[in-house]
């Protein structure tokens, strides 16, 4: 294999419940929904990523859309393996290659993951032509992506709100001192909104529409400084069966999300109560950092700040903080050896 070593390429993967991101040579080259479309009759996968997402909720009985990752871990092994392979193939620099390159990968995993789930991630990566696979916990990668020095003897609190899980971790000296992982995140927010539309407006909306509401007028507080315009929602009237349109404000969405946001607040308070006193003093000075798509919910940082009496900072481009950090770790693999699992 020695003479082939020049063909080895380094890539970093943030394998998320909602989106999968890949960096290559310090650039995010793939940012795709974690979804595949499968033909029920043949079992063949017919679309991956954005193409499959367009079909989501609009398929006939012979085609089903699958989200192979659930709560940040692999739920459908074959579909996830195929999706990873196809997304790697779609990296522009690899398309021109005659042979697929050998890969050295750093892959993100949730902090509450089991050994069996780790094995599934590693196997999927190896089947996608990875010769070396390193795993890094998401809060650790998010901290590096935000620009926090995770190797110094100083406590930092990171909250990564993804699609399937909210990861809360206190980091110091390249390790997780205490963490809390809860299955309340972006997907639960989307379901809360769909349920609210059903119960309050008698309007049946699909997952994609509920997600559009979350992005357009999603909020954790009713009282916002810069409130978005009400959003026009189309769906099916549950009483008449006819398509209809209603207007939804951010205040309504904040009421719909109240229970889920409270559960995240409670988990943060629990993590803080388990933090050693010296690290708690550091967090008092440095504040809390938010990353992940869920941290973009309007007013969430303010609400967490009110609950904890601590300053709360949202990462720049929070959706890509984790994959950015994974890329930095990959580039300086010897420096970050202690935070990786291989």
Image (spheres, rainbow, N blue to C red):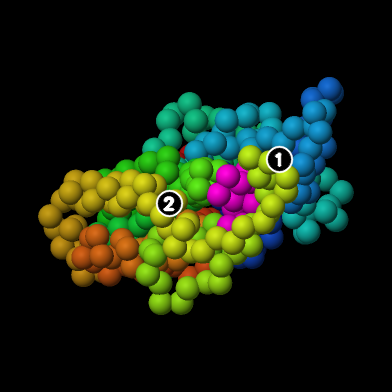
Magenta stretch: residue 24 in it? no
Compared across the picture, whether 289 is left or right of 286 comes to right
Q: Quadrant of residue 231?
A: bottom right
Query: Percent x, y for residue 270?
Result: 23, 46
Q: Which disc, if any, is residue 317?
A: none
Query: Disc 2 or 1, which lies upstream in sequence?
Result: 1
Residue at far front of view:
240
Query: Percent x, y for residue 117?
Result: 50, 30
In the rendered image, which quarter contains the N terminus?
top right
Please name whichever residue, 227 or 6, is drawn nearer the observer in this view of the structure: 227
Q: Could you tell me which residue is drawn at 72 percent across and 36 percent down?
A: 65
Q: Could you tell me which residue is drawn at 63 percent across and 35 percent down?
A: 68
Mark 1 falls on what kind of element?
Answer: loop
Residue at far top of view:
41
Q: Which residues are magenta?
A: 201-213
Residue 117 seen in this snapshot:
yes
Magenta stretch: residue 209 in it? yes
Q: Could you tell me which residue is drawn at 77 percent across and 42 percent down?
A: 58
Q: Are marks 2 and 1 in contact (CB under 8 Å)?
A: no
Please name whichever residue, 280 or 297, is drawn nearer the observer in this view of the structure: 297
Label 1 CA crowd tier, 10 Å (few <14, some 14–19, many 20+)? few
Residue at far left of view:
277
Residue placed under numbered mark 2 in the picture: 257
Q: Quadrant of residue 147?
A: bottom left
Mark 2 falls on what kind of element?
Answer: loop
Query: Percent x, y for residue 129?
Result: 70, 39
Q: Nearer the viewer, mark 2 or mark 1?
A: 1
Q: Could you tell me which residue is drawn at 58 percent across and 37 percent down?
A: 69
Magenta stretch: dominant SS? helix
Residue placed under numbered mark 1 in the picture: 241
Compared across the picture, whether 285 is left or right of 176 comes to left
Please name whichever residue, 287 or 236, is drawn nearer the observer in this view of the structure: 236
């Amino acid at each position: 294999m020695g003479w082939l070593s020049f063909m080895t390429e380094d890539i970093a993967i943030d394998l998320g419940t909602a989106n999968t991101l890949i960096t290559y040579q310090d650039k995010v080259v793939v940012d795709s929904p974690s979804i595949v479309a499968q033909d029920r009759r043949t079992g063949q996968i017919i679309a991956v990523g954005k193409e499959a997402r367009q079909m989501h909720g609009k398929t006939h009985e012979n085609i089903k859309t699958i989200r192979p990752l659930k709560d940040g871990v692999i739920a459908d092994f074959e579909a996830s393996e195929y999706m990873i392979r196809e997304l790697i193939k779609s990296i522009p620099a690899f398309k021109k290659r005659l042979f697929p390159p050998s890969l050295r990968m750093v892959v993100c995993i949730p902090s509450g993951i089991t050994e069996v789930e780790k094995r599934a991630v590693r196997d999927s990566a190896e089947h996608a032509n990875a010769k070396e696979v390193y795993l890094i916990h998401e809060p650790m990668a998010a901290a590096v992506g935000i620009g926090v020095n995770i190797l110094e003897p100083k406590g930092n609190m990171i909250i990564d709100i993804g699609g399937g899980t909210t990861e809360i971790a206190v980091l110091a000296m390249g390790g997780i001192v205490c963490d809390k992982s809860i299955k309340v995140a972006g997907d639960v927010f989307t379901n809360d909104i769909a349920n609210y539309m059903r119960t309050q407006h008698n309007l049946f909306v699909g997952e994609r529409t509920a997600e559009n509401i979350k992005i357009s007028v999603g909020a954790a507080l009713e009282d916002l400084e810069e409130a978005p315009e009400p959003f026009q929602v189309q769906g099916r009237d549950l009483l008449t069966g006819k398509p209809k349109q209603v207007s939804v404000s951010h205040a309504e969405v904040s009421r719909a999300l109240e229970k889920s946001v409270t559960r995240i607040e409670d988990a943060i308070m629990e993590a803080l109560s388990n933090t050693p006193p010296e690290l708690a003093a550091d967090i008092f000075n440095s504040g809390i950092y938010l990353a992940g798509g869920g941290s973009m919910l309007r007013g969430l940082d303010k609400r967490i700040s009110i609950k904890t009496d601590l300053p709360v900072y949202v990462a720049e481009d929070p959706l890509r903080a984790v994959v950015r950090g994974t890329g930095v770790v990959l580039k300086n693999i010897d420096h970050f050896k202690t935070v990786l699992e291989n």
